[in-house]
Amino acid sequence: MGAPSRFHTHAVGVLLAVSFLAVVALGQATGCSSSSSTGGNSPCGFPCAAGTACLDDGTGQNLACRQVCTASAQCPFNTYCNEAQPQSWCAASTAPVPQVPSGQWGATCSPSAGEAKNPSCDVADGFACYGTSPTDATAFCTLYGCEFDSDCPGTWWCARLNQGPNLKSSNPTFGVTRSVCIPRDYCAPCHLDHDCPNASNGTPQHCVLDATGGGFCASACATDGNCALDATCKNWQSVCAPGQGPACQSDDDCPALAGIVQHCDAGKCAPECASDGDCSGPGAGGAGARCQWARVCTPRAGVCLGDGGFCSPCRSDADCKNGYCLSGLPYSTEHFCSAKSTSASCDTTSANPAGCPAHATSDNWLLNACITSPPNQCVGLVALGTSTGQVSELPGCWTVNR
């Protein structure tokens, strides 16, 4: 069993009431008004305090002075920098917790102590330890049972993950998933650039559109060697580099320059460009600036989350229609959907057995095979180098063949 949920024990009405009170408290703390457009020289009734702006909550009926932001680090505890446009603001968490000195979001915890009641975590407020193996040195305190990204801190998201492997066992589970708040990393869903923090190694990330128009967090890169094996380093936006604009942490820190969209490139705002000539204007780059591609790691599949069919990219078993979300670990970081064999008993002794999807010339995977765990499942195979002079064929669909 996973750590007990603290979210689903509350009625929706209670959550909404708590969220409303948190918004009111935030308004009072920042000198905001919750009054609607009546009187004075401002739509909010009077001028808003520094650092706030008169903004609607999205309903069209609730103007208030709200604390503006371009990153969640600018927001108080139990709030996050939302995805409102044209201006984001610090919105109340939908699952606020009492703030204590230790044992909460991202605090290190000991895998050997298990998930629930881990003494390193704030157990009294529902925090538990999360990790992907009994020896996971990166295990951290978080909350299980979330429903929305807004139940989690800014730059985190509510992920649906397989229950195992976990701190109790390195063995995978099949068909059993749970939700947990985790930091956004490569391929996590996003809407705006500030949703994506720097990667664990410090590399900047951007919120990039995939082939279907959905957003995903993508790390900056120079070559394919900077990316996971199932990803490639692709051109994203051409910008004037080196950037000469204001310091930035994300694209959201960079206002348009004379109507030209800017991006955060190597810590400085840089406008988009089509040629070197676009980089000669004031603030565009100046002497030495050139129009160059900013590059990001992009899934070879084109998307981080597919349609659920065979070899479709996935994050958990819940993403697969007729199979399970399997991994190429430890040889690859990709996750892909298997497919149940249409044969009564899938032949595990031969390549491309009857009952498995036929191979097309456009497929990156070379062969497919049946596996015994979980039983009667077809998986794709890729060539990952050689071992003792033989090509090693390993489970995978999009990892580059070597």
Image (cartoon, helix red, strand yellow):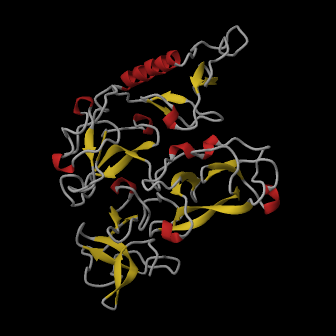
Which residue is at the far top?
39
Q: Residue furthest bottom?
A: 389
Q: Position of residue 208 (x, y in %)?
A: 58, 54
Q: Which one is in front, 137 or 142? A: 137
> What residue appears at the point 25 percent right and 40 percent down from the top-left corner?
128
Q: Residue 31 lies in what quarter of the image?
A: top right
Instruction: Residue at 70% x, 15% y: name it.
Output: 42
On screen, residue 238 versus residue 33, left or right, reads: right
Q: Residue furthest front?
A: 287
How many marks are shown on the rendered structure? 0
Residue 19 horizontal side relative to residue 138, left or right:
right
Q: In the picture, which quadrant includes the N terminus?
A: top left
> Which corner quadrant holds the C terminus?
bottom left
On screen, residue 105 above or below 352: above
Residue 114 location in percent, x, y? 18, 46
Q: Residue at x 51, y 81 (%)?
A: 361
Q: Who is closer to the viewer here, 235 or 328?
A: 235
Q: Is residue 173 left or right of residue 98?
A: left
Provide residue 95's location: percent of width, then percent of height: 38, 30
**Residue 391 seen from this side:** yes
Which one is nearer the viewer's eye here, 281 or 226? 281
Q: Is residue 224 above or below residue 208?
A: below
Q: Is residue 341 visible?
A: no
Where residue 321 sits in the image (x, y, percent)? 38, 58
